[in-house]
Amino acid sequence: MKVKDAMAKDPICIDPEAPIGTALDVMRTNHVRHLPVTDDTGQLMGIITDRDLRQAAFAPFVQEYLSGAARQRAQGLGRTLEDLRVRDVMTWVVVIAHPEASLAHAALIMSERRVGSLPVVDGGRLVGLLTERDVLSALVTHGRIAEFDPEGFLW
């Protein structure tokens, strides 16, 4: 199975200049944890996750427990949340997948890199988003788990 067969097409995206409050509202409203950040032409710039938003919100409160480098980063995030933009807290270097990649390869990358989603890029443009849920759904629908007998499973 290919990534293009399991990914969400036309994922919900956000502009890097959007306030992080807007990103939080979009995530809550659409029940998603990952928002690709794109420019006006659809080029992937980064990704913002619920984890990025939590880190931005709690960073000012835990500064005294951080290392020197982490403390400097937290101080930069210490501005009021109203002043922060998506670009201030998003992940800039993003692990991506190609739509023709195998789903198994993408799942391996997600596991090794410990990421919950992979933006799917073709020709430099975002064409989809593959999440952990997409991988599990594909496995249940098309994989051996579809033959799983819940009565025979020991908890």
Image: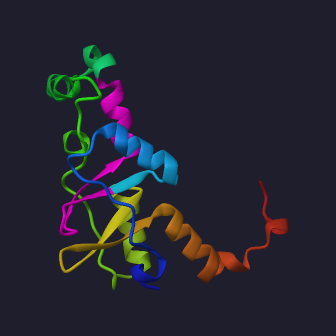
Magenta-highlighted residues: 36-59
Q: Residue visible at 51% across and 68% down?
A: 134
Side of 38 where 116 appears, left or right: right
Magenta includes 93?
no
Q: Can the viewer see residue 1 in this picture?
A: yes
Side of 98 where 143 appears, left or right: right
Q: Quadrant of residue 79?
A: top left
How far from the left and from the top, in percent, is residue 44? 22, 64
Q: In this rendering, is residue 147 above or below 87?
A: below
Magenta includes 39?
yes
Q: Residue visible at 20% across and 46% down?
A: 17
Q: In this rendering, is residue 135 above or below 76?
A: below
Q: Residue visible at 18% across and 69% down?
A: 41
Q: In the displayed orientation, state which residue is furthest to the right.
A: 151
Q: Residue visible at 29% across and 17% down?
A: 65
Q: How is the image coloured?
A: rainbow
Q: In this rendering, is residue 44 above or below 71?
A: below
Side of 119 where 140 appears, left or right: right
Q: Which of these two is toward me, 152 or 100?
A: 100
Q: Can the viewer see residue 114 in this picture?
A: no
How far from the left and from the top, in percent, is residue 28? 49, 45
